[in-house]
Image (spheres, helix red, strand yellow):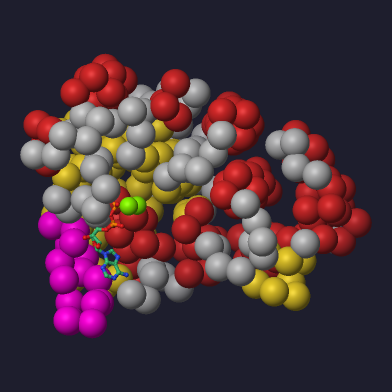
Amino acid sequence: MATLEIKDLHASVTTEDGAKEILKGVNLTIRSGETHAIMGPNGSGKSTLSYAIAGHPKYTVTSGEVLLDGENVLEMSVDERARAGLFLAMQYPVEVPGVSMSNFLRTAATAVRGEAPKLRHWVKEVKEEMGKLGISQEFAERSVNEGFSGGEKKRHEILQLALLKPKFAILDETDSGLDVDALRVVSEGVNEYKAGNEVGVMLITHYTRILRHITPDFVHVFADGRIVESGGRELADELEENGYVKYAGSPEPAK
Ligand code: ADP
Ligand code: MG
Ligand code: MG
């Protein structure tokens, strides 16, 4: 049993006009085995929360704590965070020309496992997981994220999840840009990983539709840099019905 604790987290982003506070006191505890949906309007700071936990250089934690089994995540390097069992899909959004997916994933797996997987085993492992996710085999030879469609990027994230086997996975807008078929494949990938591993999932999303595929144990409404309400699955139904008006004064629907 592992625990990820976010305590009164404040963070700002560096802009041309200086620092702007985005996170205004986030409190959340996730235990392994639990799936927490974080839902909120655009611009409320959801991605900033994942960047702050990832240690993105543009985002500065000004106060508060992030603890993984009591260990201070904010003091860890990005590699140390991965080795501690934290998976952040946002960690690898960039194009890396000239580095094949297979090599890239092997480097990531080496960081997490503490030793390089044997090449022959690795090729087999990657093939197997790609097959399960319906990813074509030529994908392994392509450069990281180069010319990937939105759907391919998301499948890549789920492939990383399956190969790196984290204790906690933070998936930001995993549903955005996915057509119905891709959404189903990605959701099945997450669900299969959840079924086989004691993982805690933070599923960040603007829309409720992915929650028809991945059932959350808890739903949190995120508005203006903090969690303003928490509940069970029924809270997502309420958001689908009424949008975020009540929380953000914005009429946009959450569908
Ligand atoms: P969400 O993911 O909920 O849509 P974000 O965390 O992306 O929200 O953004 C929260 C706020 O922080 C927005 O007002 C956004 O404009 C601002 N922000 C986020 N990242 C940056 C950045 N790199 N530079 C400037 N402003 C940013
Ligand atoms: Mg946004
Ligand atoms: Mg976002």
Instruction: Please tell me which residue is depicted at 32% across the width and 63% down the height of the picture.
Output: 52
> In which quadrant is the C terminus drawn?
top left
Q: In which quadrant of the rendered view does residue 23 lie?
A: bottom left
Does the magenta portion include 51? no
Instruction: Look at the picture and state if 219 lies above or below 153.
Output: above
Q: In which quadrant of the rendered view does residue 38 lie?
A: top left
Q: Which range is magenta?
A: 10-24
> In which quadrant is the N terminus drawn?
top left
Image x and y of residue 28, in percent: 24, 44
Instruction: Look at the picture and state if 149 lies above or below 133.
Output: below
Q: In which quadrant of the rendered view does residue 16 lie?
A: bottom left
Q: Is residue 252 visible?
A: yes
Image x and y of residue 235, in percent: 24, 22
Does the magenta portion include 23? yes
Instruction: Please tell me which residue is depicted at 14% across the width and 39% down the height of the picture.
Output: 250
Image x and y of residue 79, in percent: 53, 69
Q: Give the residue at the far right of this rendering.
A: 120
Instruction: Please tell me which residue is depicted at 25% across the width and 30% down the height of the picture.
Output: 253
- Nearer to the camera, 254 or 11: 254
Instruction: Look at the picture and state if 145 lies above or below 204.
Output: below
Total of numbered circles in the picture?
A: 0
Q: In this view, does 40 lie to the left or right of 91?
A: left
Instruction: Please tell me which residue is depicted at 48% across the width and 38% down the height of the picture.
Output: 175
Q: Is residue 110 visible?
A: no
